[in-house]
Image: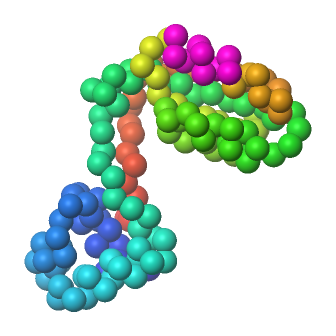
Amino acid sequence: MDELDRKIILELNKDSRLSFREISKNLNIAVGTISHRIKKMEEEGVIKGYVPVVDPSKAGYDFIAVISVTIKRGKLQDVASLLDRFDNIVSIYNVTGNYDALIIARFKNRVQLNSFVKELQTFDNVDKTNTSLVLNTIKEDIRVKFE
């Protein structure tokens, strides 16, 4: 990636629905160059896709939980594959420290959260979990920034 690729990504971060022509105009670069660069970044997996950014609370997902998980045997991938069926999981991270993984998930209510945690604890290779409920979101941004 070079500086032009970074500028293109920053434009797409502002509005991923911009046309090649609009990006070209904003950056004062030929449309063909913009088209070629974006297609190349898509092929190389730099740009993985385009999705709408939804406000989870407006979609009814008011509860954000950070769930720490200790794996007793096997690999984190084994647990992650079991979790594929849950649509409310935002992220799963393999981490250092007292736990092996962090799960960030959104729930519509406490009942849904409780049900998820109880089911997670039934997985054979999950040793223990610790759940924290997010009280306030101070900053959340899914865009990649280049500074």
Question: Horizontal and vertical percent for residue 80?
Answer: 68, 42
Question: Horizontal and vertical percent for residue 27?
Answer: 17, 77
Residue sitting nearer the eye, 50 or 67: 50
Q: Residue furthest right?
A: 73
Q: Main secondary structure of the magenta part?
A: helix
* Residue 130 appears left or right of 58: right
Residue at the image point whose x is 25% and y is 60% from the top? 16
Q: Is residue 96 above or below residue 2?
A: above
Residue at the image point whose x is 59% and y is 14% from the top? 114
> Which quarter of the rendered picture does the N terminus lie within?
bottom left
* Residue 37 appears left or right of 92: left
* Residue 69 appears left or right of 114: right
Q: In this view, does 19 lie above or below 145?
A: below
Tell me if residue 30 is in the magenta stretch.
Answer: no
Q: Give, as a single range, the part of the protein colored magenta.
A: 111-119
Residue at the image point whose x is 30% and y is 34% from the top? 55
